[in-house]
Image: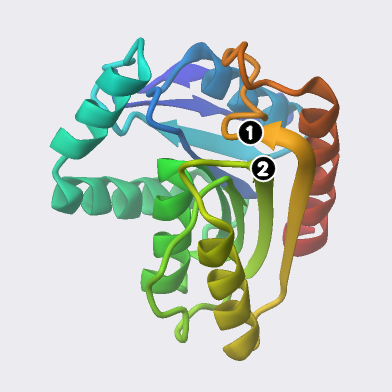
Amino acid sequence: MVDLAGSGYYAEPPSGPGRGVLILHSWWGLTPFFRQLADRLAELGYSALAPDMFAGRQPATPDDAEATLAAADPNEGAALVLSSAQALRARTSDPRQAIAVIGFSSGASWALWLSARSPSEVAAAVAFYGSQNIDFIESRSAYLGHFAEFDSLVSDDEIVEMEAHLHLVHREVVFHRYPGTSHWFFEEDRALSYDATAAELAWDRTVAFLADQLG
């Protein structure tokens, strides 16, 4: 488990490299929660990399987070996501094999983008309360989505449209909605939104999905 010169966090199983899982954080930045998530995945046998999309910034309020996200250069973000996927793949037990990507909120949008724009890199994509409206026709990924019942940042229409499009291009897709939850329900450090029961269920579903898709 190492910080990569301030640019990210990498965790590897004690037994050595495993299949790769890329973690793309939400607009709160690369907080301890996402480092711990990488450690949890390493304990399950995966090599996990969480790049720092905000160069060390960890906004304290929603307004700060929204401003930080708005100020981010999308071209730099795309380059970082692509290079992180390639760097992780090179560290895995078999660099010939595609990786999985898990994204949260804005990070979920990037995860979905990666699966469509670099299909050879991604075998499985997990989106936590985030969407994407690009064309998925080139994707080779399977998809798992976790969405809140009450969400001012992601509408039901967005979710339904994305799910329909993924089915239309014949991708394997399963989306779950969690009753009574709101945006950030999985992130334990978001005290006002965190839902332990929903988070545990989403985690169990994610672990099963990764095992099924990555082996």
In the rendered view, tell whether residue 187 sits above or below residue 75: above
Looking at the image, which is closer to me, 212 or 103? 103
Which numbered marker is on residue 29?
none
Can residue 168 be seen here? The reply is: yes
Q: Give the quadrant of residue 172.
A: bottom right
Looking at the image, which is closer to me, 4 or 116? 116
> Residue 175: x and y, percent?
72, 61
**Chain-order first, disc 2 or disc 1:** 2
Query: Residue drawn 34% across and 29% down?
Result: 52
> Residue 215: x and y, percent?
80, 58
Determine which residue is flagged by label 2.
148
**Does 136 sit left or right of 56 as displayed?**
right
The total of numbered circles placed on residues is 2
Can residue 96 be seen here? The reply is: no
Circle 1 Cα neighbour tier, 10 Å, few/some/many (<14 / 14–19 / ≥20): many
Where the N terminus falls, by quadrant?
Answer: top right
| CA distance for labels 2 and 1 | 5 Å
Query: Residue drawn 60% across and 57% down?
Result: 94
In the rendered view, tell whether residue 154 sits above or below residue 96: above
Determine which residue is flagged by label 1.
182
Whether residues under marks 2 and 1 lie with C-beta atoms below 8 angstroms apart, the answer is: yes
> Residue 143: x and y, percent?
65, 65
Give the residue type at disc 1.
Answer: Ser
Circle 2 Cα neighbour tier, 10 Å, few/some/many (<14 / 14–19 / ≥20): many
**Colour mapping:** rainbow
Give the residue type at disc 2.
Answer: Ala
